Image (cartoon, grey):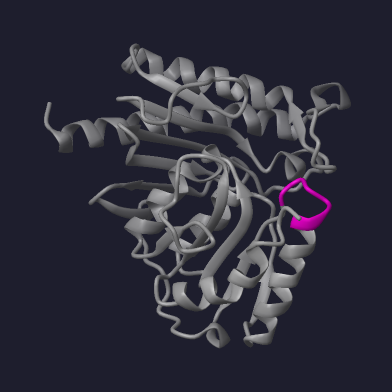
Amino acid sequence: MNAVDISTKALNVATEAALVGATITRRYFEQLSDADIQQKTTAAGGANLVTTADVESETAIVAAIRQQFPDHAFLGEEGHVARTDAPNLWIIDPLDGTNNFTHGIAQFAVSVAYYQNGKPVCGTVINPASGDLYTASVGGGAFRNGKQVNVNAHQNLSQTMICTGFYYDRGAMMRSTLDAIDSLFGKGIHGIRRFGAAALDLCAVGAGQYGGFFEFTLSPWDFAAAAIFVREAGGKITDCAGKELPLTQTSVLATNGLLHGSMTETLGPHLDNTRS
């Protein structure tokens, strides 16, 4: 099987597995009870929730992929651990936007990505509530609900809308994010949006709705699939300093490419304050 065939098969499997997770999360979303919600231990000071849906979704996604690729490795938010440079690695967020999910807000996602030796191959992101499906493979373009999409052509921050996210930290990182938002408003942006599901926010950059998205801390499962979507839609994604995006917990900046310099320049003064 050549590289194209492998990529095509992997994208089909990623999409099928994401749909399995979406079925589970949608079912719980429609009938979620307090007994299904727990809070993870965190030193960051914010509400980091986990639900029965998160755990069941990840288990089912892994099982679906293993039917096709039994020897592959898995890295997931809810307990699957693997080296990020594994020869064949699936990176899974079984429910991105759990806080939205637990409050009945229909802005959450299932994200499945496939990487080989630390390099992206393909990924799928789905909003189980709306059914919006985002798929991308390296060299194959980015598609929303089967239609190819591209980033917008905004050349100046004063032409565009920006999206952001907040980590669970309620200290220096939150204040730095708020300060960065203030600086962006000083550049004349049309507005700031914070919807609470990074995978969907990143896909919205790829689909041309935002000129950029930034968050000062995200984990690989938050962005692994959506990063492929952004790049294949013609955008650029790095850390917030403009450096290559690692498959570790990191800051993330995604733009249409044309705004990347302006965004890194604006965010730069706030990066050193995120952990002070």
Q: Quadrant of the C terminus?
A: bottom right
Residue for point 37% across, 63% down: 149
Q: Which residues are magenta?
A: 167-173
- Residue 112 location, x and y as percent? 46, 35
| Drawn side of residue 152 relative to residue 273, left or right | left
Looking at the image, is 158 positioned above or below residue 123?
A: below
Looking at the image, is 159 positioned above or below residue 267?
A: below
| Drawn side of residue 182 relative to residue 232, left or right | right
Looking at the image, is 188 positioned above or below residue 95?
A: below
What is the quadrant of residue 90 in the picture? top left
| Drawn side of residue 268 relative to residue 18, left or right | right
| Drawn side of residue 207 relative to residue 72, left or right | right
Work out which residue is located at the far right of the displayed protein and give it: 34
Residue for point 36% across, 30% down: 85
- Using the image as rendered, state which of residue 64 and residue 233 is in the foreground: 233
- The reply to whether residue 223 is in sight is yes
Residue 169: in magenta span: yes
- Using the image as rendered, state which of residue 237 and residue 32 is in the foreground: 237
Q: Quadrant of the N terminus?
A: top left
Residue for point 63% across, 49% down: 217
- Residue 214 location, x and y as percent? 59, 61
- Residue 50 location, x and y as percent? 74, 29
